Amino acid sequence: VGARVEIRGLKSRADLNGRRGSVVLHDPDSGRFEVRIEGPADERIRCKPENLAVVVQKHSPSKVQGDEAFKEGRNDRAVELYRRALEEDAQGDAELAATIHSNMSAAYAKKGDHQRS
């Protein structure tokens, strides 16, 4: 319970395959997990364990430091830290790289450098 998962291999609700959510309940009698699907609606589905893959989120200390610098208005430092995070932490992780690029773009925009953002 609490794990972030990706839904896979559903036949009756194939439209949910690839969607992510959080496990909110485990029913030991049925062996299924209830997953709250990410998104604006409070959609939930009960899945067998074989239809769920745990999503491991990579930790990036440089990204965290960049986020703090951005919140403090130190946008040059934030860009520097986001670049380091891309080089050191995001290799092979497209989702983390996309998040870091998005954050770096926001930092450039805050600096008024809309060409780079």
Image (cartoon, rainbow, N blue to C red):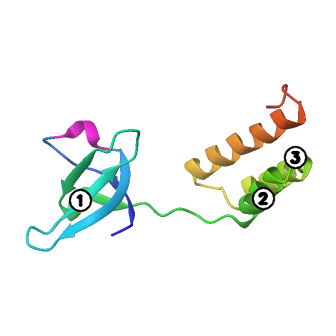
Residue for point 38% across, 67% down: 2
Number of numbered discs on residues: 3
Q: Which callout, 2 or 3, points at the residue further toward the start of the chain?
A: 2
- Image quadrant containing the N terminus: bottom left
Q: Residues within 10 Å of mark 2 (few under 14, many from 20)?
A: some
> Residue 8: x, y in percent?
27, 50
Side of 42 relative to 103 (left or right): left
At 87% across and 46% down in the image, what residue appears? 75
The residue carrying mark 3 is 75
Judge from the rendering whether residue 21 lies leftward or rightward of residue 34; answer left or right. right
Residue type at tag 1:
Glu
User: Up-down: is 8 above or below 114?
Assistant: below
Q: CA distance from mark 2 to mark 3?
A: 10 Å
- Residue 27 locus on image (x, y percent): 16, 69
Q: Which residue is mark 2?
A: 68
Q: Amino acid at mark 3?
A: Asn
Question: For the residues marked 1 and 2, what is the alpha-carbon distance in whole angstroms?
Answer: 34 Å
- Label 1 sits on a secondary structure element that is strand
Magenta stretch secondary structure, dominant: helix
Density class for disc 3 (Cα within 10 Å; few <14, some 14-19, many ≥20) is: many
Residue located 56% across and 48% down the image: 95
Highlighted magenta segment, given as a residue range: 13-17
Residue identified by numbered label 1: 34
Q: Residue at x 84, y 54 (%)?
A: 72
Q: Position of residue 108 (x, y in %)?
A: 83, 37
CA distance separating discs 3 and 1: 41 Å
